[in-house]
Image (spheres, helix red, strand yellow):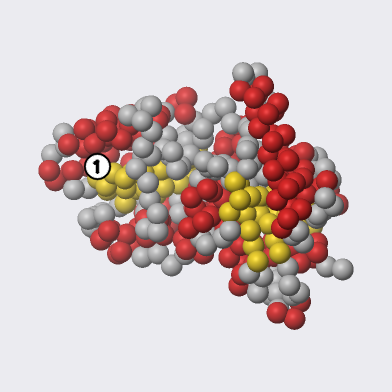
């Protein structure tokens, strides 16, 4: 079993001037974890934190919004299957990203690189190794990704969100820290969430999300049974705005056909921002994919969930995440192969029919989270750079 850190209270007397570079992104989960660590570092007096990420990933928007210096590099995805894009990604973009990262790290001269995982983090991690800069890797899912498995071979420590059953990492270097949550998601209000979206606190609220880009399959199934769903609940639907699928326009058309009374129960948005904390506080149930970010947020905030894992992800990590929470009684797993309008309506109605059990699921979800995960990761960073 990995060693577990006790709750940590990092005092100012422990600190010396440090510069930490965070590397990662590509998904909301990788970005959110890094932002949570950056906020914790600042709370403990380490304000010189910079970020290396991709040019177009979600981190390219969210990190500058958080006020952190941001450096974009070329990135390429590490696919473990044949795809023509592997030729350009592995042959050009990954080597270019490595060289760009190496130049950046030589100039920035950080004390440590914190890699949040994913294909965006690997070139900076390899560059840090070549410059003898300590690396800490954070694995957020129940199934380690390829990038972290490579970086874990030379990382000083590998921080885990969940205990691992396999031997993906050297046992002597893994530490169970949990996965931190962004501070701005805390302190939400159900009343404010309902007010923002014109809903009432008297009816159950379901938050449907497919991640920052939305989920085409979930969007279409929700839209196909919108009327019956709204008979049972109110819905806040974050659908993305993918022009290739046209889901947002199609959902707006579906909503326009609803009777006026039901239409007031449906709040459709392409994206959500600062209001997300109030959405979570208002939600009696979350319906969505089971990526690391969504699962972590539901656990920290004590939200019961109906997870529809995205099939085909590396190591089927989303199914592993969903199974872990379902086994703890914190969520229900609905495989995409079984997803249709009738099955979705049945699953949501069954969950909403027992308010007491929903609350119990939320409490069990909260017990899966590590409340001081960000501080535990700060402690790892301080230990790694100690003389």
Let me know if residue 182 appears in the view. Answer: yes
Q: Residue at x 71, y 64 (%)?
A: 19
Query: Does residue 34 appear left or right of residue 158 in this picture?
Result: left
Instruction: Give the quarter of the image for residue 108.
Output: bottom right
Q: Residue at x 32, y 59 (%)?
A: 193
355 or 209, nearer to the observer: 209
352 or 296, nearer to the observer: 296
Where in the figure is residue 130, as x and y percent of width and height? 83, 46
Q: Where 383 sits versus 280, above or below?
A: below
Pointer 1 local density, CA inside 10 Å: few below 14, some 14–19, many at least 20:
many
Q: Quadrant of the C terminus?
A: bottom right
Query: Does residue 42 appear left or right of residue 342 in this picture?
Result: right
Circle 1 SS class = helix
Would you name the residue on which mark 1 appears? 230
Where in the figure is residue 105, as x and y percent of width and height? 73, 52
Number of marks in picture? 1
30 or 186, nearer to the observer: 30
Q: Residue at x 67, y 22 (%)?
A: 87
Query: Outermost residue toward the bottom?
Result: 13
Q: Residue at x 38, y 39 (%)?
A: 240
Where in the figure is residue 327, as x and y percent of width and height? 58, 44
Let me know if residue 36 appears in the view. Answer: no
Query: Does residue 187 appear left or right of residue 137 in this picture?
Result: left
Where in the figure is residue 65, as x and y percent of width and height? 48, 58
Instruction: Give the quarter of the image for residue 341.
Output: top left
């Amino acid at each position: 079993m990995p060693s577990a850190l006790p709750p940590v209270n990092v005092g100012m007397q422990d600190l010396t001037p440090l510069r930490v570079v965070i590397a990662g992104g590509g998904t909301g989960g990788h970005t959110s974890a890094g932002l949570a660590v950056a906020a914790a570092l600042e709370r403990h007096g380490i304000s010189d934190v910079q970020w290396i990420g991709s040019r177009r990933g979600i981190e390219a928007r969210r990190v500058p919004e958080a006020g952190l210096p941001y450096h974009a590099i070329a990135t390429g995805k590490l696919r473990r299957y044949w795809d023509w894009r592997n030729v350009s990604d592995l042959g050009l973009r990954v080597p270019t990203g490595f060289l760009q990262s190496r130049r950046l790290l030589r100039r920035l001269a950080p004390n440590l690189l914190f890699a949040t995982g994913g294909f965006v983090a690997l070139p900076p991690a390899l560059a840090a190794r070549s410059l003898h800069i300590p690396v800490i890797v954070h694995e957020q899912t129940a199934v380690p990704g390829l990038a972290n498995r490579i970086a874990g071979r030379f990382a000083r420590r590998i921080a885990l969100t969940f205990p691992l059953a396999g031997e993906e990492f050297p046992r002597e270097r893994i530490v169970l820290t949990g996965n931190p949550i962004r501070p701005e998601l805390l302190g939400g209000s159900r009343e404010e969430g309902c007010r923002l979206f014109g809903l009432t606190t008297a009816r159950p609220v379901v938050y449907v999300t497919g991640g920052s880009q939305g989920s085409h399959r979930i969007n279409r199934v929700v839209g196909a049974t919108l009327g019956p769903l709204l008979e049972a609940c109110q819905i806040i639907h974050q659908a993305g705005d993918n022009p290739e699928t046209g889901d947002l326009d199609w959902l707006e058309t579906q909503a326009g056909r609803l009777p006026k009374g039901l239409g007031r129960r449906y709040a459709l948005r392409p994206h959500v921002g600062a209001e997300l904390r109030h959405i979570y506080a208002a939600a009696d149930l979350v319906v969505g994919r089971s990526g690391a970010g969504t699962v972590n947020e539901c656990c920290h905030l004590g939200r019961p969930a109906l997870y529809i894992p995205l099939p085909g992800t590396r190591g089927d990590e989303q199914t592993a995440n969903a199974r872990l929470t379902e086994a703890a009684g914190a969520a229900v797993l609905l495989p995409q192969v079984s997803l249709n309008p009738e099955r979705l309506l049945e699953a949501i109605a069954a969950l909403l029919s027992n308010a007491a059990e929903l609350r119990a699921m939320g409490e069990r979800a909260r017990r899966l989270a590590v409340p001081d995960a960000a501080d535990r990761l700060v402690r790892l960073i301080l230990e790694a750079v100690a003389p």
